[in-house]
Amino acid sequence: MSPQQEIAALGARIQEAHAAKDAGALAACYAPEAFFFDLAPPLLHRGFDAASTSAWFATWDGPIRLETRDLEIVIEGSSAWAAALQHMRGTKTDGEKVDLWFRTTTCFTKRAGKWLILHDHASVPFHMDGSYRAAIGLTPEQADA
């Protein structure tokens, strides 16, 4: 497999772990010292928190479906980064239907022949009208090309 294919396969494992709500499988995709800029607070956290992820998975009824779009991968030796749009869909245990597009930038390191995520950044734009509301209703079709 090429490095791009290896990183794409890692992305597929992340999607599978979300669908199965398997925090252990998801944790295996990350370097121990990985740091995160997630959609939820705090601004930064370090290390994959399997207990917190399991608790979040428990708030979903059925699989969490992730789809990647417009994936760009850049590889320099044993480092790489990828940027993409992510589509997350599913149903929460309270019946809320989630259908959310967000942006991701992911940094990778290759260790002992295996790509691992070193940094994961997810974000949504916010309305610049003074309300500072997250613009969670956007879709790729509304992108400014």
Image: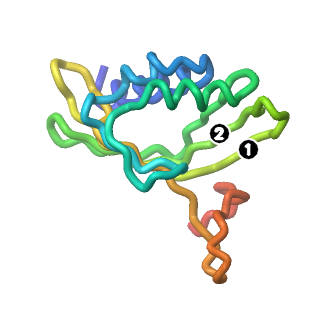
Name the spot of residue 8 as percent of width and height, x first: 41, 29
Q: Position of residue 124 (x, y in %)?
A: 57, 58
Q: Amino acid at mark 2?
A: Met
Q: Quadrant of the N terminus?
A: top left
At label 2, counting other C-alpha atoms closer than 10 Å, the crowd grade (few under 14, some 14-19, many 20 or more) is some
Location of the C terminus (image quadrant):
bottom right
Above or below, 129 against 17 in this view is below
Q: Which image quarter: residue 67? A: top right
Instruction: Say which quarter of the image contains residue 140.
Output: bottom right
Q: Which residue is mark 2?
A: 88
Q: Which residue is mark 1?
A: 99
Q: Is residue 116 left or right of residue 50?
A: left
> Which residue occupies the foreground of this view, 58 or 141?
58
Q: CA distance from mark 1 to mark 2?
A: 6 Å
At 73% from the left and 44% from the top, the residue drawn is 99
User: Looking at this rendering, what residue extends furthest in the right direction?
Assistant: 95
Point 51% across, 55% down: residue: 123
Q: How is the image coloured?
A: rainbow
Question: Can you give x and y, in whole percent of width and height, for residue 128 in the image?
Answer: 61, 79
The x, y position of residue 17, in whole percent, is 53, 21
- Whether tag 1 and tag 2 are in contact, CB under 8 A, the answer is yes
Indicate the amino acid at tag 1.
Answer: Asp
Is residue 128 positioned above or below 126 on the image?
A: below
| Label 1: element kind | strand
Residue nearer the viewer, 72 or 127: 127
Residue depicted at x 84% and y 34%: 95
Would residue 31 be visible to someone looking at this image?
Answer: yes
